[in-house]
Image (tube, rainbow, N blue to C red):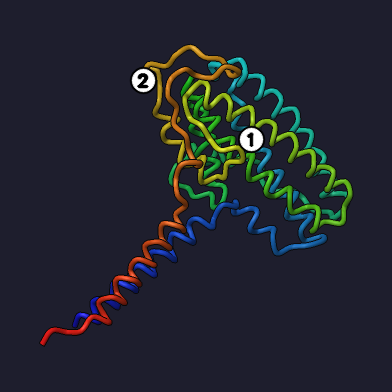
Amino acid sequence: MKKSYILLVLVLFALFAASVSSVAAQTMSDDTNRLKGLRGKDFDVAFMKLMIGHHEGAVAMVKYAPTNASHAEIKQLATNITAAQNTEISQMKGWLKDWYNEQPDPEMGGMVDHKRGMPEMNMGSMDEMVNQIIELIDAKGDDYDQKLLTYMIPHHQSAIEMAALVVERSDRAELKTLAQGISASQRGEISQMQGWLQAWYGVTLPANPTAAQVAEAAPTAIIRSADDVARPAVSPTTGPTSTTRSVGNDSLPLWLLGGVGLLLAVVVASYFMRRPTRS
């Protein structure tokens, strides 16, 4: 009976370790994972269609910044994103048609309109982005700024992950140059947004945040407001004088915690299984 109980404990810990390891391993976006098995024409077409939709999502996120944002820096960022990504969208649409006689997927604006009219509608892999855009349409002031920063950082990070695949999987020099530009510009914007997130709302991210680390910070960033805490006057360059919350650098990965738990279970089980039974 004792051995059966111990075996059950071992199985449960093994399942726990496997599940948390799987969650921790999902640092790349779904779009990136779709592209990883493709090369040549198949990769080019899939990459451009995904990146066009991805860029349209970013443009939709910042569309209401001129009227909804609180900070001038956010409004300028929105202008930069709109100009750069609309130019890249036009380039990719042209290449899709000229190189492969392909058309892009339906535009993001139509998805958002349908989702607002029918909230129960599931947009598949685009559902999360569409829901974020709808939240930003209705957000005002600091609420808009906080949400935009916490949504746009992982959004940019997923674009960088996709762009990193182009060098080895595409034969098109134009596409490689585009990918390098996307990576460079969006890394710079991530750095800007991290600085503002820390300075204005007291949320600190590691130097190269994963989507999971930003997601961990997002709830704190969104609910933290002037009504919740006394927020000092700060600028993006000087940063806040109050204590801030650091995300990602001071927490143990889930796979490590699961592994430690499994190891302890094995040690304890081995001890009891080898211990002589009292007569």
Residue drawn at the location 71% of the way across and 43% of the way down: 52
Q: What residue type is disc 1 on?
A: Ala
Position above or below: 176 against 203: below
Q: Is residue 266 above or below residue 4?
A: above
Position of 91 with respect to 267 (left or right) is right
The residue lying furthest to the bottom in this view is 279
Residue 199 image position (x, y, % from top left): 53, 22
> Residue at 41% of width from left, 32% of height from top?
220
Q: Residues within 10 Å of mark 2 (few under 14, many from 20)?
A: few
Name which quarter of the figure residue 228 lies in.
top left
Residue 62, horizontal then vertical, whole percent: 61, 28
Between residue 49 and residue 146, name the one nearer to us.
146
Residue for point 75% across, 37% down: 184
Q: Of label 2 and label 1, which has the lower sequence position?
A: 1
Please, is residue 74 above or below residue 155 in the view? above
Residue 279 occupies quadrant: bottom left
Residue 229's label in the rendered image is: 2
Q: Residue furthest top?
A: 233
Q: Which residue is mark 1?
A: 58
**Percent from the top left, x then y, of residue 203?**
48, 30
